[in-house]
Image: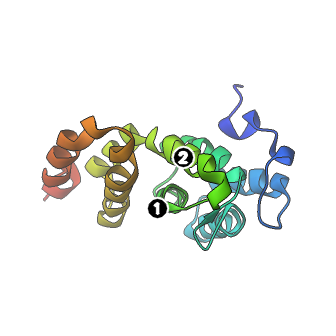
Amino acid sequence: MPLSEIDRYNWHDLQTLEASTSDISRALKDLSCATTKKQADQAYWHIDNHVIVQGDLYQSAAAVVPCVLEILQNCSEEVRPFCLELLAEIGLGEAGPLQQTLTDDCRREVSRGASVYFHILQVGTNKEKETAVTLLINICLIEDSSLYDRICLLYTSPSPRDQRG
């Protein structure tokens, strides 16, 4: 069985607010296995309350992003909004003034999910589409301005879900 993104990181070396970073890897695994909104919500808050607190990024946030992107590509509809929200929180967060590279690293990692966010524009719920647009406009577009035309085209086109009678 191939290693997941979660298994790639030495979580003990990464900083969070208060929690053990092994707790973060456990919460990510819980999020990936969640089958209900309640389970996803619990995992979400455990991650959110330790890697991005009140908009402040902690070192582990940059490692969390590729893990959440991997989960997002394989998760149930119950889990998807929580993954998108985590990515938006991290992508819009800020590290302290002496850690600008962490802010940049997090935004770069979040922007790597652009193709996934474009897919969400086609198949997601309205709330998921709103979060995907936030990710695309406020993070991905800053990293890659060539996405502008594609964002405009897909955001204004009705999705297959919208066209169903």
User: Measured along the vertical axis of the image, is residue 84 above or below residue 69?
Assistant: below
**Circle 2: element type:** helix
Q: Badge 1 is on which residue? A: 81
Residue appearing at x 62%, y 59% in the figure: 97
Q: Badge 2 is on which residue? A: 104
Horizontal side of 46 relative to 110 (left or right) equals right
**Circle 1: element type:** helix
Closer to the camera, 34 or 84? 84
Say whether residue 80 is visible. Answer: yes
Q: Residue furthest front?
A: 98
Q: Amino acid at mark 2?
A: Asp
Indicate which disc, 2 or 1, sits on the residue closer to the N terminus: 1
Q: Find residue 18 and report its horizontal and vertical position in percent.
A: 83, 67
- Circle count: 2
| Label 2, label 1: how far apart the Cα atoms are | 24 Å
Q: Which quadrant of the figure has residue 17?
A: bottom right
User: Measured along the vertical axis of the image, is residue 137 above or below residue 144?
Assistant: below
How packed mark 1 is, by other alpha carbons closer than 10 Å (few <14, some 14-19, many 20 or more), is: many
Q: Which quadrant of the figure has residue 58?
A: bottom right
Q: Find residue 38 and report its horizontal and vertical position in percent.
A: 61, 71
User: Measured along the vertical axis of the image, is residue 105 above or below residue 2?
Assistant: below
Residue appearing at x 82%, y 39% in the figure: 10
How packed mark 2 is, by other alpha carbons closer than 10 Å (few <14, some 14-19, many 20 or more), is: some
